[in-house]
Image (cartoon, helix red, strand yellow):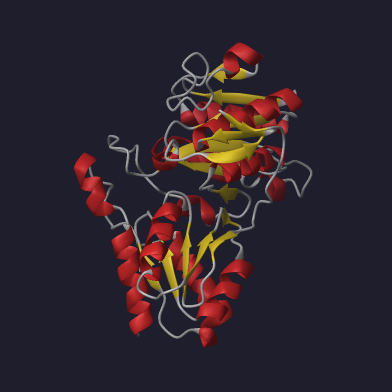
Amino acid sequence: MITKVGVKSLTIVQAVNDALRTMLKEREDVILLGEDIGKNGGVFRATEGLLEEFGEERVMDTPLSEAGFTGAAIGMALGGFRPVVEIQFLGFIYPAYEQIMTHAARMRARTRGHFTVPLVIRAPYGAGVRAPEIHSDSMEALFTHMPGIKVVCPASPYDAKGLLIAAIEDPDPVLFLEPMRSYRAFREDVPEGKYTIEIGKGKKLREGDDVTVIAWGAMVPVAIKAAEEAAKKGIDADVIDLRTLYPLDKDIIAESVQKTGRAVIVQEAHATGGLANDILAVINDTSFFYQHAPVERVTGFDVPVPFFAYEDDYLPTPSRVLHAMEKVMRF
């Protein structure tokens, strides 16, 4: 649906499709690989219509072998292509973990910069869509601790398109996480054609002086809702969408916390070993003497993501985030 000249109103999954189409048109070295991405257009239809437009030499259905087609894509990237791999769900990435961490992430260092791996790995992630086991994992922290691979996680259609194009043009591997809970949750005006958003830069979505709320992916709408409820109680929050999880935008975090003196981090993933702990360390390293209260974390629990209706008890909610905001204000 076109809302104005040069702008389309798109969902996140449509913006992903638009970014892929844009780069397939612009660069002949861009190739898509993944399970069911061709004839079926992907399990979420993120690649719908691309096989018909660009042919099976550019949009390749693969066997059910994440390690196999991810390893093949690494070889393609070393050979001059820019492959974009789709992992159907982030929880399916574990067989490919060895290929990503042993080879893709290390190749620049291993060859002293003589070879790079311009590879994008797209993966829908997260709970909230009533999916079966291993479909709902939010395991970004498995990748944020390995130098050599960037981790990107957009929360809006505009950011999804601009960041995906930037990821495809990046000379190094990028894990591109797509919050499937938000795939069709809302629309946003997205420019037609090519544009990029710098990887490694967060975005402030709301201005406030009392507390900083930091989130990414599907937790961004949760953080915004909590901030709106807090405003009714006289608490004004800065809300930051990290957008890139590695490398972190430490400047935007520090600037906000040094202004507000309080912070709440919202993370869908399990509490132990999660990215929130690294963000907390950034706050302590840069802004310890500015803090008026200990940092609060609102996270998933240290259990496998539960089935179906119990997902609602696992996921952070606006009410849990609001409670954390009130707690740091009372300290």
Q: Nearer the viewer, residue 328 or 185?
A: 185
> Which residue extends farthest right?
114
Image height of 32 relative to 313, above or below: above
Q: Residue 209, image x and y in percent? A: 51, 77
Q: Is residue 132 left or right of residue 294?
A: left
Residue 251 lies in what quarter of the image?
Answer: bottom right
Considering the image in quadrants, where does the N terminus appear? top right
- 328 over 58 or under it: above or below: below
Q: Give the residue drawn at x 48%, y 37%.
A: 123
Q: Is residue 149 above or below residue 90?
A: below
Decide if residue 258 is on the left or right side of residue 166.
left
Location of residue 60 by image quarter: top right
Residue at the far left in the pictured view? 309
Q: Position of residue 276 (x, y in %)?
A: 44, 64
Image side of residue 103 versus residue 260, left or right: right
Q: Residue at x 54, y 41 (%)?
A: 188
Residue at x 51%, y 38% (from the top left corner): 12
Nearest the viewer among 271 and 244 is: 244
**Quarter holding residue 308:** top left
Camera sees residue 227: yes
Q: Is residue 319 left or right of residue 108?
A: left
In the depicted view, which residue is nearer to us: 176 or 209?
Answer: 209
Count all numbered tags in the image, as a single digit.
0
**Residue 55 seen from this side:** no
Q: Position of residue 148 (x, y in %)?
A: 63, 51
Instruction: Assign the C terminus to one quadrant of the image.
Output: bottom left
